[in-house]
Structure formats: C-alpha cells, structure tokens
Amino acid sequence: MQDEIRKVLIIDDEKNLRGSLAEFLALDGFECTGAANGEEGLSLLENTVFDAVVLDLRMPGMDGLAVLQKIREGGPALPVIMMSAHGDISDAVAAMKAGAADYLVKPFDPAELVIRLDKAVSDSRLMRMARVGQRLDTSRSTAGAWLGDAPAMKEIGSLIRRVAPTPSTVLITGESGTGKEVIAREIHRVSPRSAGPFVPINVGAVPENLLESELFGYEKGAFTGADSRKTGLFELASGGTLFLDELGEMPLSMQVKMLRVLQDRALMRVGGSRPIPIDVRIIAATNRDLEAAVEAGKFREDLYFRLNVIRLRLPALRERKEDIAPLAGLFLSRFAREMGRPVTDISPEALRLLSSYSFPGNIRELENSIERAVILCETATLVPADFALEERLGKIAPPLSVPAPVSVREAEKMAVIAALERNSGHREKTAVELGISRRTLLTKMKEYNLLER
C-alpha cells in the first residue's frame, strides 16, 4: 500500500464496475470518485483535483474519446487510462493518439489497472516537477530548483534564511558537484551584503606560491616581477562575500595566515608594512572530511573552529532523487535557450532513467548529461536514447517502464504496419503520419521485427 493518497476519477456507465474498481484500488492507496457518464465526469474535473482518470470508451451520450479530448484541452498533465470491452484495434490506436496514457481491454485483472495507474501517476508527477524547473529557469530563480523539495534541502533553505542576515562565517560541505557555490551565492543574494561583490576562488586550483598574493595582494617591488601594487581578493570582496571553495586543499603554511586575518579582521599585503582593515563575509566550502584532516594534522584545528560557525551539509543527489526532475527541467530550459535548440520537453521514460541512476558526479553530472542530450537530440523531446546512462546502469537497473498490454502492443504494431504500407515503406512520411520522430519509428520497427519492410 502506498503512503500517500492518490485521487482517481472513474468514468463508466456500469455502476457495479465503478464500485468494484473503487474498492480494489482503495486497497492500494487510491481514493476513487465515480461518474456515470462523460458530462458528470467533466463536471467533477472542473471542481476537484485528481491524479488520474480511468475512462470507459463506450458510454451513452458523450463517448470516451470525446471526454478524452475535453480533458486534453485542459492540458496534458492529467493521465487518462482508457477501458473498452471491445478490444478494437482502431479504438486503441485512436485513444493513444488522442493522448491516453494507457489502454485496457475488459475484462481485465484489477491488479493490472493498479500497475498502470502507479506508472501513469508517477510519470505525471515527474513531468509536473520537470515543468517546475523549466518555469524556475524562466524566472531565473536558479537556486529554487537547486534547493528542491527533498526534506534535507528544505532544511538547508530554512538555514539559509536564518543565516543570511548575520555576518557569521558559513562552512558548506558535501560531495563534489552538489552545488556548494550555488548555495553560497544564494546566501549572499539574500543577505544585507547583496549589493556588494560575490568573489569566488578555488583554493585548490591556485599554486601554493601564488595563493597568498591572490588572497591578500602585494605591494610594488614585493618580489621580482611585482611592477605595481595588486589588490587581493579579500579587498576586492569588501562590503560583500568572499567564497573560498575547496578550502580543505589550503596548505598549512597559508592556514596560519588565514587564521590571523579572520581573528584580526585585517590583512597585510605581501611586501606591505601596515595592516589593512577588511569588511568581508567568509563562506567556505569543501568536499573533504575536515574533521579527519584535523585528526591527521593536515588542517589546523583552530582555523577549523573559526570557519565552522554555521555548517551546511549538502546531500548527494542520490539522497534527494525527488529533485532530479525539476533540476532536469531547469537545465533543459537553460541549455535549449542558450544554444538556440528547439527542445521543449523531456519524456517520462527519460525522467525515470535519470531517477534510476545514482549520479556519482551529483548535480554537475546531471547538468552535463542534460547539456549533452540537448545538443545531440533529434526531436523536441528528450528520450532515453539521448542520454549515455543506460550502459552505466547495466543489468542492475530497475525496469524503466511497465510493458504495454498485449492489446495495445498489437494495436501499435498494426498501426505501424498500416502506415508503412500506405507510404510505400517511406520511413520519414510514415513517422510524420504517426506523429512520431523517425528515431522512434525505427525503434518501434526494430521492436516489432519490421526493419526489413
């Protein structure tokens, strides 16, 4: 049984069937409402939010296809599963082309309907979350998508709101690629220092002999080649925030000088003779275990305590899988816009693929995967084939989709065969007629052993 209630509308003129399906679905956490005809069902849809609709094809008055069309006019998000006692292939094809999520032939095992509803509701929610990310990109609220809805990230959001107004030093920890700089920028953005500069530096990327000059600056003549005074990053960040990324890579010799600056709130340029007061907030980040580094003598304990005033631990993406869909939507929208690519959507199958992968590179790896897919895709919708994750998932991956019912598979096969025959085997024309991409057509032809046609 599911932990959450999912609301389902059953539209069927057979009262006994409505009742029996409602009783069976209730055992799996579905809350069902019945409607005896299409008009009644549409009226209910206007006043109540449902997660899915189970719709009979043959009914007196408005038939199921007409009801489906009305539902689709309200938007593509609500999944509809069609039912029919006739099993007519043309009915199945018409229902699926009109936007039905699935199709079952009466009589069917109610357990099969549960499987179909689970998949349809899950797909619908993934799509909705992806669209949330796309809207966040449009509004440029990038941090909103990065924070997401996972409980751990909601706590991070709460901490940001409480910490941002203060001058306290913040230490952000987490695996590489979890978005530490994004969170640091968000803290700065909502802080009283937001009008000042946000100055980032990757400590691990700067050679040890240059790090002091980069941070503190130097005076003219301080060393060979110092032809003029250089302002360091601490001074450049005055009135704002200095972000020290990969702090755990800082050499011990530099840690001593950093501690003195944090204690005195003043620095000495290389070659300088007088202290310079600083007005800067420090946010540091690391993917290393600083406590272990302290124990091993590789990181000064006093500097660790000075930096670890407020601690934000960012969870790995595999610990917040509910945020994958909105992040995917965010990156899809961004890269399509930046690259001028006509990619507008991501399929439920692709979202399930992404959700089944552990992403050892975290959000950065997801971002790179979406960028690659946007560049290489051949249609307006990203599909699993546009990603390079399937080979990494291997045989341990869970099923990416529930196999289609036999009647729907046969209907689909017959529809492809008929379209190929009408177009004399021309694949481009066949794909256009069926309303699918050429790649999808080839996939279906391979699935049904039709490539020789």
Image (tube, helix red, strand yellow):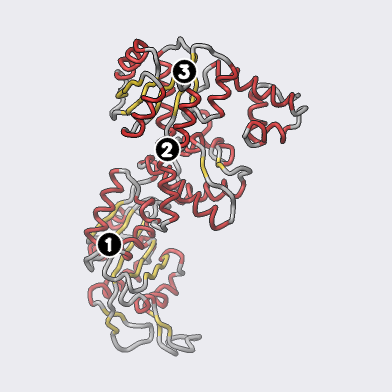
- Residue 38 position in % (x across, y down): 41, 23
431 above or below 223?
above
Task: Name the residue located 72 percent from the left edge and 26 percent from the top edge.
Answer: 420
Query: Could you tell me if residue 396 is visible in this image?
Result: no
- Residue 39 position in % (x across, y down): 39, 25
Which residue in the structure is indicated by mark 3?
83
Query: Could you tell me if residue 281 is visible in this image?
Result: yes
- Residue 187 position in % (x across, y down): 30, 62
For disc 3, the neighbor class at 10 Å (few under 14, some 14 to 19, many from 20) is many
Tell me: 452 left or right of 112: right
- Residue 422 numbered mark, or none: none
159 above or below 224?
above
Which quadrant would residue 245 be assigned to in this image?
bottom left
For disc 2, the neighbor class at 10 Å (few under 14, some 14 to 19, many from 20) is many
| CA distance separating discs 2 and 3 | 24 Å
Which residue in the structure is indicated by mark 1?
170
330 above or below 99?
below
Q: Nearer the viewer, residue 373 or 127?
A: 127
Work out which quarter of the rendered image holds the N terminus and state it: top left
Q: Work out whether mark 2 precedes mark 3 in sequence or the reverse, and give the earlier one.
A: 3
Q: From the image, state whether disc 1 or disc 2 is nearer to you.
A: 2
- Residue 126 numbered mark, or none: 2
Under mark 2, the amino acid is: Leu
